[in-house]
Amino acid sequence: MNAPNDPGGKSGQPDSRPSIFTSGEGDTPAVHITVLRSILLPPATAPRSSMCSTIAPVTTFTQSFTRRAAAFSAKDSAKLGYPLAALEQENRRVRRVDPSKVRAQGCRGPKVAVGVYVGTLAENNRRQTMIHKFDAIIVGAGQAGPGLAGRLAEAGMTVALVERKLFGGTCVNTGCTPTKTLVASAYAAYLARRAGDYGVSLGSTVTVDMKKVKVRQDTVVRNSREGLEAWLTSLRNCTIYRGHARLESASQVRVGNDLLTAERIFLNVGGRANVPDLPGIDQVTYLTNSSLLQLQILPRHLVIVGGSYVGLEFAQIYRRFGSEVTVVEMADRLVKREDPEVSAGAQEILEAEGIQIRLDAECVRFAASGQDVRVYVNCRDGEPEILGSHVLLAVGRRPNTDDLGLETAGVEIDERGYIVVDDELRTSAPGIWALGDCNGKGAFTHTAYNDFEIVAANLLDQDRRRVSDRIPAYALFTDPPLGRVGLTEVEAKAAGKRLLVGFRPMTEVRRAVEKGETRGFMKILVDAESRLILGAAILGTGGDEAIHGILDIMYAKAPYTTLQRAVHIHPTVSELIPTMLGELKSPAAVGTRADV
Ligand SMILES: Cc1cc2nc3c(=O)[nH]c(=O)nc-3n(C[C@H](O)[C@H](O)[C@H](O)COP(=O)(O)OP(=O)(O)OC[C@H]3O[C@@H](n4cnc5c(N)ncnc54)[C@H](O)[C@@H]3O)c2cc1C
């Protein structure tokens, strides 16, 4: 299944026959026809409608994980010189499905699919194996794989990049990008409702058109995905394979009927929503981050199980759109990894917007109730059950390592399924690296991308970059957001550090007052002996941006006084960071609540 840009040379003969398979990651498996797509993929400038004809996902089969399906047009088939009837004959057990059921999602042009065929994986595997040799194989086109493919190909290596579903992975398709477009829509609704506070009058009611919100989300996502895909398919020396990759040895990867071999294999397989085996979960319909992003309606009452980063972003988004929202958290506070002030601050912000928070929910169970779902909780306060129209599970992620053939290649995983790697991201199998969320060293786009930088620097630049050089940094994109770097106070105290703490409520930040966004605070931790900054949290307007000034000083390994003496721009949130550093006190004097 060779793409048009196949360098030929080491990768063997192109397979000109159509191959059928689906990918089943997460809860919305997509359908691809690899040969059709790689042969017919139009130039990046072609109208989107012509592209859609070859990649239309088949919504009819989104519930099916076991079947293999494909949709294509008679026109495409004729171009290939491979008539539909021949395909039907070859896959003897295929079933023809009513073409009117086929919907070419996201296409502006006319619907072109005229047939849908469903076969089995066994049918597909029966076909002859083709062997292709490369210098490097990359599994997964998420946040590390594409960059690495670019660098390796540029260095003259022949590269195979395998993606089983959507280019860009979680971040682009079901994570950062769609959620942040929703955060923006939700912020617009929130600000519109508050317009009067600013002397602006907008009329009586603010309404949110969920279909338009979704169109905006999908457009931003599609542009990002297609841009990446167009770049990857145009790369010299890089061959794209579409399908599920599985290791057959430490140097072999199978993708359908293609057996790829290389001395170097890079795994960038990411993760998916964790679905814990909670009582009654199999009796009800639930949503994950992926399926919630497909909704075009406003849930009447969204119950979110999980009060951490993903859950809280969705909670505020849907509350601002107009849903009733309840967050059910098993711990005794929200975002438990953060310091208690942060948990309390986030709770206060969300409750002020009308979000119900139920903590200490240790016995969560579910039951269907007509169209609704009963969520039973065992909390300190409130009713023992919540009746929701929709339930979102936001209880962590799990790595996509269970169907990768890791055991056959001798790649070690830990008890949670994460691939064990060293400081340069090498696995226990020589010649195999693991990058991104699947190695458990980070859970963010920037950490996955940094993994690519580390591997490329070590392999190509003789620059010994390591994971342990990385300072933890991330944001919770509620409004106001939480920007975080380094240690929490709890962690710093557990590490035995003698601390100085700076603290400032956002009510004492002029820019926040001027913007009318004074919720939250800033907090910074300094090592009293080394005078280095150990960590910081900015829960407040602009906190996701302002935190970078602190992060950069930490990377520079400069004492806090360097930042304290910097002259920042007025009026900004950042300008109060030097001021806060000039008022450092002991944790007891500040009155922080972090106990080890
Ligand atoms: C709701 C949500 C919001 C988020 N928001 C943010 C945010 O704002 N900022 C942030 O930094 N991070 C955010 N994240 C986390 C971020 O999305 C991930 O950390 C990031 O995508 C990890 O990148 P990755 O390359 O490791 O994996 P992924 O992006 O998951 O990519 C892995 C790719 O591998 C493919 N694949 C898997 N197995 C196989 C196989 N066997 N064969 C072929 N292909 C395979 C998958 O289809 C996928 O395309 C969010 C996550 C979620 C769920």
Image (cartoon, grey):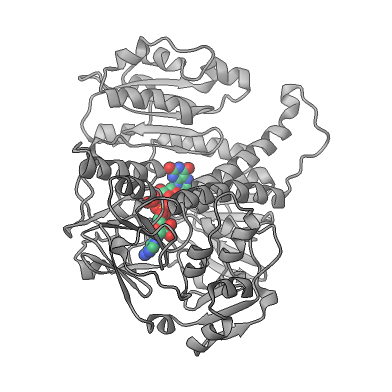
Residue extending furthest right? 203
Residue shown at the point (58%, 57%) measured from the top left: 292
Please state if 586 lies on the left or on the right of 299 as rendered: left
Report whether residue 480 is seen: yes
The image shows residue 157, relative to residue 453, as above or below, that is below
Residue shown at the point (39%, 68%) measured from the top left: 244
- Please tell me in which quadrant of the rendered image residue 392 appears: bottom right
For the residue pair 263 and 171, the one nearer the viewer reads as 263
Q: Position of residue 558 (x, y in %)?
A: 26, 19
Please state if 526 lies on the left or on the right of 530 as rendered: right
Q: Position of residue 352 (x, y in %)?
A: 61, 36
For the residue pair 5 and 299, the one nearer the viewer reads as 5
Q: Position of residue 165 (x, y in %)?
A: 47, 62
Q: Position of residue 378 (x, y in %)?
A: 49, 58
- Please tell me in which quadrant of the rendered image residue 553 appears: top left
The total number of labels drawn is 0
- Please tell me in which quadrant of the rendered image residue 7 appears: bottom left
**Quarter of the image containing the N terminus?**
bottom left
The image shows residue 67, relative to residue 492, as above or below, that is below
Residue shown at the point (22%, 52%) measured from the top left: 421
For the residue pair 409 and 85, the one nearer the viewer reads as 85
**Quarter of the image containing the C terminus?**
top left
Residue shown at the point (67%, 75%) measured from the top left: 101
The image shows residue 194, relative to residue 240, as above or below, that is above
For the residue pair 125 and 416, the one nearer the viewer reads as 125
Report whether residue 106 is seen: no
Please state if 136 lies on the left or on the right of 474 as rendered: left
Please state if 387 lies on the left or on the right of 529 as rendered: right
